Image (spheres, rainbow, N blue to C red):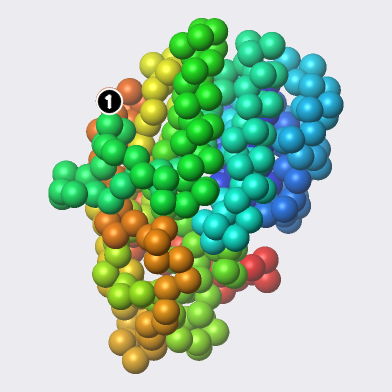
């Protein structure tokens, strides 16, 4: 198939591109490099089915129209502003990228009848209230402009399925981590903790650390994303993916550091947007796609730490 991946030079995007190339599809990448980086995808440049990279903004309608003349079969739309704190400080940029940019992509998908897989987030949910985990029917709570912009985009994506019969699917992966994730402030908690451990620095926990996260290894996430694109059963659906078990940030820090004295608590920078318990129920992904995670947290941390130690790309 001919496949476009927006945000394909980003952390999850580069793994989605890898999976698609390994499955022998022809892949095009669009990214504005505001968060992604060329180093993430440079290894693909010599692959025959890697069709090239376009540096561009999903809000650039002229560029998007030109790109879609390729007549793709599927668009995996991962391009977005992803930082919760940035969305609180600068909501307009997040809204324009995540909601309006998605609308422009939708319009071109409708024009050329291209299936759209829309990358949303578990951050749209209210906290889990039971050990059964969060299902797709769980209450949403836009506790940040990032979550609000994603919910708005989700609704537009599903409206094109119902109004126009366009094959679309909304995916909500839980907290994803692994190799190629940035280790700075915009990175994920696992990558940041491991980087600090490797450098002999203390692991800093915002707030009490009692908040929990369901941590999904990135290759499992990429397989989920791609499977949602391949399956017609996913069309018109919202689908979760996660490990199916959660861990408190305190326990995660101890698991990584191995020493309580290497951990300190600091004042939370955005407590109003914190979700106290995130636990994924992925039964729907299993039923529709046959998807289950393959990499447990301990193995995923080992793989991520090995990568961080082996690279200058941080």
Left or right: 238, with 109 as reference point: left
Left or right: 9, with 257 as reference point: right
* Residue at 42 percent of width and 39 percent of height: 172
* Residue at 54 percent of width and 12 percent of height: 166
Q: Position of residue 137 (x, y in %)?
A: 27, 31
* Residue at 74 percent of width and 50 percent of height: 33
Residue 216 visible? The answer is yes
Which corner quadrant of the image does residue 277 belong to? bottom left
Q: Where is residue 34 in the image (x, y as percent from the top left)?
A: 72, 53
Q: Position of residue 149 (x, y in %)?
A: 53, 40
Task: Name the secondary structure under disc 1.
Answer: helix
313 over 120 or under it: above or below:
below
260 over 101 or under it: above or below:
below
* Residue at 37 percent of width and 31 percent of height: 239
Check disc 1 and report the residue beneath it.
287
Q: Position of residue 248 (x, y in %)?
A: 28, 66
Q: How many marks?
A: 1
24 over 216 or under it: above or below:
above
The quadrant of the picture occupied by the N terminus is top right
Which corner quadrant of the image does residue 254 belong to? bottom left
Residue 20 visible? The answer is no
Of 89 and 117, the residue lying toward us: 89
The quadrant of the picture occupied by the C terminus is bottom right
Of 133 and 253, the residue lying toward us: 133
Mark 1 burial class by Cα count in 10 Å: few <14, some 14-19, many 20+: few
155 over 45 or under it: above or below:
above
Left or right: 254, with 179 as reference point: left
């Amino acid at each position: 198939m001919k496949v476009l991946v927006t945000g394909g030079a980003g952390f999850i995007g580069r793994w989605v591109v890898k999976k698609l190339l390994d499955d022998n599809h022809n892949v095009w990448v669009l990214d504005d490099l505001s968060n992604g980086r060329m180093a993430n995808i440079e290894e693909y440049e010599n692959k025959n089915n890697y069709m090239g990279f376009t540096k561009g903004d999903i809000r650039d309608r002229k560029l998007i129209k030109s790109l879609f003349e390729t007549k793709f079969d599927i668009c995996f739309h991962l391009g977005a502003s992803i930082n919760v704190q940035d969305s609180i400080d600068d909501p307009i940029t997040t809204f324009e990228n995540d909601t309006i940019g998605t609308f422009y992509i939708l319009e071109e998908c409708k024009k050329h009848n291209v299936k759209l897989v829309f990358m949303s987030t578990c951050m749209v949910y209210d906290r889990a209230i039971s050990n059964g985990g969060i299902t797709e029917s769980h209450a949403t709570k836009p506790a940040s402009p990032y979550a609000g912009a994603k919910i708005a985009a989700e609704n537009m994506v599903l409206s094109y399925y119902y109004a126009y019969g366009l094959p679309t699917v909304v995916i909500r992966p839980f907290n994803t981590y692994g190799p190629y994730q940035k280790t700075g402030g915009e990175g994920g908690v696992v990558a940041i903790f491991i980087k600090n451990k490797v450098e002999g620095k203390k692991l800093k926990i915002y707030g009490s650390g009692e908040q929990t996260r369901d941590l999904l290894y990135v290759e499992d996430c990429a397989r989920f994303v791609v499977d949602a694109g391949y399956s017609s059963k996913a069309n018109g659906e919202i689908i979760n993916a996660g490990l199916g078990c959660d861990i408190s940030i305190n326990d995660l820090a101890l698991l990584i550091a191995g020493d309580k004295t290497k951990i300190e608590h600091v004042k939370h920078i955005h407590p109003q947007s914190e979700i106290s318990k995130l636990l994924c129920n992925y039964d729907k992904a299993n039923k529709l796609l046959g998807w289950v995670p393959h990499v447990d947290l301990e193995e995923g941390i080992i793989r991520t730490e090995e990568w961080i130690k082996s690279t200058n790309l941080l």
